[in-house]
Amino acid sequence: MRFSEINLFGVYVAPISIMIVAAWIVTVGLRRIANRFGLLGFVWHPALFVFAIYMIVLSSIVLAIAR
């Protein structure tokens, strides 16, 4: 599938930028859940772990939309 620009209030936006924002919102939610249950205390490098989760979420969104 070919991605095309999205008209957002008269401004053409690349679809990847919308996906980046969506992945960030999902990652923030997942990070809050992990903090609430203390799961980030079990990982070696929390920032690296959150970045890896962000990349997994972003790639999942891209693959789901490209299908």
Image (tube, grey):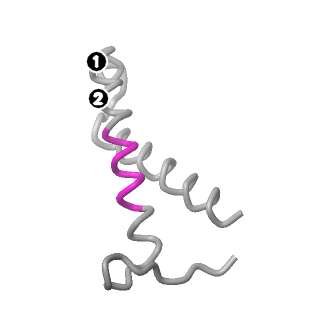
Residue indicated by mark 2: 32
* Side (left or right) of 9 relative to 64: left
Q: Position of residue 55 (x, y in %)?
A: 46, 53
Q: CA distance from mark 2 to mark 1?
A: 6 Å
Residue at 28%, 41% in the rendered image = 47
Q: Residue placed farthest to the top in the image?
A: 37
Residue at 38%, 85% in the rendered image = 12
Secondary structure under the numbered disc 1 in the rendered image: helix
Q: Amino acid at mark 1?
A: Arg
Magenta stretch: dominant secondary structure? helix
Which mark is drawn over residue 12?
none
Residues rendered magenta in the picture? 20-28
Q: Position of residue 6 (x, y in %)?
A: 45, 78
Q: Is residue 7 above or below residue 52?
A: below
Q: Is residue 28 above or below residue 32?
A: below
Residue at 33%, 43% in the rendered image = 48
Magenta run includes residue 65: no
Q: Is residue 7 above or below residue 30?
A: below
Q: Are marks 2 and 1 in contact (CB under 8 Å)?
A: yes
Secondary structure under the numbered disc 2 in the rendered image: helix
